[in-house]
Image (cartoon, rainbow, N blue to C red):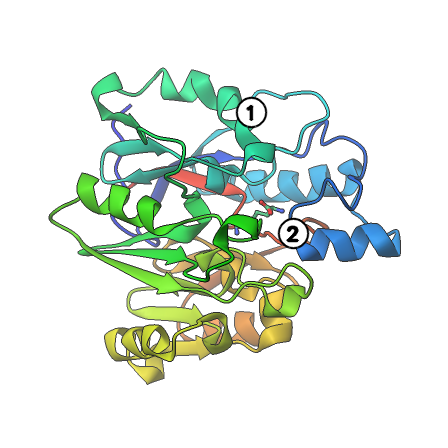
Amino acid sequence: MKLNINNETSRLRAVVLGTAKSNGPAPTIEEAYDPKSIEHIKAGTYPTEEDMTAEMAAVASVLKKYDVKVYRPEVISDYNQIFARDIAVVIEDKFIKANILPDREKEIKAIQYVIDEIDPKKVFKAPSEDIHFEGGDIMIHNDYIFIGTYKGEDYSDCIVARTNMKGVDYIKGLFPHKKVIEFDLNKSMTDPRSNALHLDCCFQPVGVNKAIIHKEGFRNPKDYEFLVDLFGMENLFHIDKNEMYSMCSNIFSIAEDVVISEQNFKRLNAWLSKNGIKVEEVPYAEIAKQEGLLRCSTMPLIRD
Ligand SMILES: NC(=[NH2+])NCCC[C@H](N)C(=O)O
């Protein structure tokens, strides 16, 4: 398989879509690693395997309709394998295994059969354990690579901060010809409305020249201003903290003019349609309870 990813929106040909099968019983509060899951565990509304499996099947059928080759992870029993995005990242023709949160370490094994189809010279793994990065924080945007990180002094105690500056530097070293820009994100282990868990929870390019953005997700206003200058204010769709909480920035592009989005994102979906982007609506509100959505549960391998 020849990998090819240069941006977030070119026509998709092959993708890994996570699975909710054998997701295991609802975790305890101690086992959870994001504040939105904790909120639902406490409220007794943590999503069921049955509901999440049905939601992911709806995504699989949209991908099938567009003739996208879909790979699913092999099922590891009682293990959360929904968020395929984070376990590796494909940039150009390289497959880079993530150094992920230890709770999620086993997820990569389940796609070894996909990795086996890639030229081993194109498969990378960071050389040391203290280099942290997850796919949800990394976005290729043509000449740029955008990376979400957290520069707070409490990084090592913060389980919602998944990419450190060593991770940023590692990616920089692999792609010296790209402009690698890091963004310092706001994190909260207690309030999901103030937690930009990954970069794709507060920002994502869409269409040809547009993007969805949550200003308050950025710790440093200069990072937000950089994106305003790059995309142009008129091309940005701003979401508020409740929309970030619903994961509005985490839709998934099949092409510059086709996205998969959640059926309840009325304001966003209307803006997309108005801008000539076809919206394939799916139900994904149960998965959203785990602080991830469509981008998080997909890992593109080949785009045009
Ligand atoms: N790319 C993403 N935003 N992934 C979301 C992952 C959510 C998952 N509950 C975690 O904390 O790891």
Side of 248 where 234 appears, left or right: left
Front residue (pair 272, 46): 46
Residue 25 is situated, as x and y percent measured from the top left of the image, at 81, 33
On-image quarter of the N terminus: top left
Q: Which mark is residue 106?
A: 1
Answer yes or no: disc 2 within 8 Å of ligand 1: yes
Residue 98 is situated, as x and y percent measured from the top left of the image, at 41, 35
Q: Residue at x 29, y 28 (%)?
A: 124
Q: Is residue 301 above or below residue 268?
A: above
Which kind of residue does numbered mark 1 sit on? Lys
Answer yes or no: disc 1 within 8 Å of ligand 1: no
Q: Which residue is mark 2?
A: 34
Residue 128 is situated, as x and y percent measured from the top left of the image, at 35, 30
Note whether residue 92 is visible: yes
Mark 2 vs 1, N-terminal side: 2
Front residue (pair 5, 217): 217
Q: Which mark is residue 297?
A: none
Residue 17 is situated, as x and y percent measured from the top left of the image, at 52, 36
